[in-house]
Image (cartoon, rainbow, N blue to C red):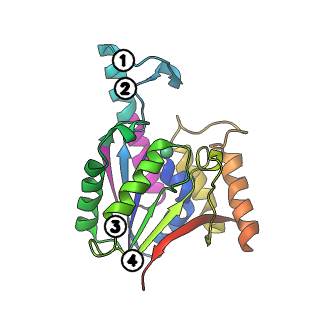
Amino acid sequence: MKVIVFVAHPDDEVLGMGGTILKHSQKGDFVKVVYLATGITSRRSTNFQNSVSYEQNENKINEMQKEIKDLRKNAKKSCDILKVKDSKFYDFPDNEMDSVPLLKIIKVIEKEIKETKPDRIYTHHFHDLNIDHRTVFNAVLTATRPMGLNVKEIISFEVPSSTEWNYPVQFNPNYFVEIKSQLSAKIKAMEAYKNEIRDFPHPRSVENLKNVSERWGAVSGNKAAEAFEIIRKIE
Ligand SMILES: [Zn+2]
């Protein structure tokens, strides 16, 4: 099976489905992760604090470029842990993907689909607090409308620290993947993102990732699981 995972930010793929990615890899499936936004906002300053101002100077721009480079290095390490076969980084603006004409994002997604011809696509969930996550979902759904590119399965995952904070409509999974043997690698893959991981009780902490996997495990009769919503399946 060929799989593309379309995410907005480096680390979304691990948070949402790191165990499932490794499970695909272990089965011999081809997995490509496509990162659409940089993952570093122009408002983020040194020490990873968000500033209220957009003001830029040369130092700040250089620093941001360095942060983007470091983040991509970490993403590659993380992909290696999950045995991902291919990855690609785009430069859409972080936390501002809604400022880009949707068609531009759709074109990139269409190009990736034409190149890889995936049987299955994983992407964000529409009811997510993060604007980039919602934008990527919209672009994927438009790019894969039936009659065009022939993708049989579209599946959404959650991203702890944004999907669960949406209101009033929430992630409502109907597909579960057991990940007991993959959980420790998922944690390691998240630890590779050393600037994104946080201490408990932050949702992006090791403890919470374990808790989430146990929660979906309990929902699906397993010790550990990841949860998904099937958006479309054509047989
Ligand atoms: Zn994200």
**Residue 32 can be seen in this image:** no
- Which one is earlier in the sequence, the residue at label 4 or at label 1? 1
Write down the quadrant of residue 153 in the picture. Answer: bottom left
Residue type at numbered disc 4: Lys
Q: Which residues are magenta?
A: 70-90
Is 179 located above or below residue 33 in the figure?
Answer: below
Establish whether ligand 1 lies closer than 8 Å to the Cβ of label 3. Answer: no
Alpha carbon separation for disc pair 2 and 4: 38 Å
Residue type at numbered disc 1: Lys
Pinpoint residue 192: horizontal percent, then vertical percent. 51, 44
- Which one is earlier in the sequence, the residue at label 4 or at label 3? 3
Q: Nearer the viewer, residue 159 or 22?
A: 159
Alpha carbon separation for disc pair 4 and 3: 9 Å
SS at mark 4?
Answer: loop
Which of label 3 and label 2 is nearer to you? Answer: 3
Is 21 located above or below residue 97 in the figure?
Answer: below
Alpha carbon separation for disc pair 1 and 2: 6 Å
Q: Which mark is residue 64?
A: 2
- Answer whether labels 1 and 2 touch (C-beta < 8 Å): yes
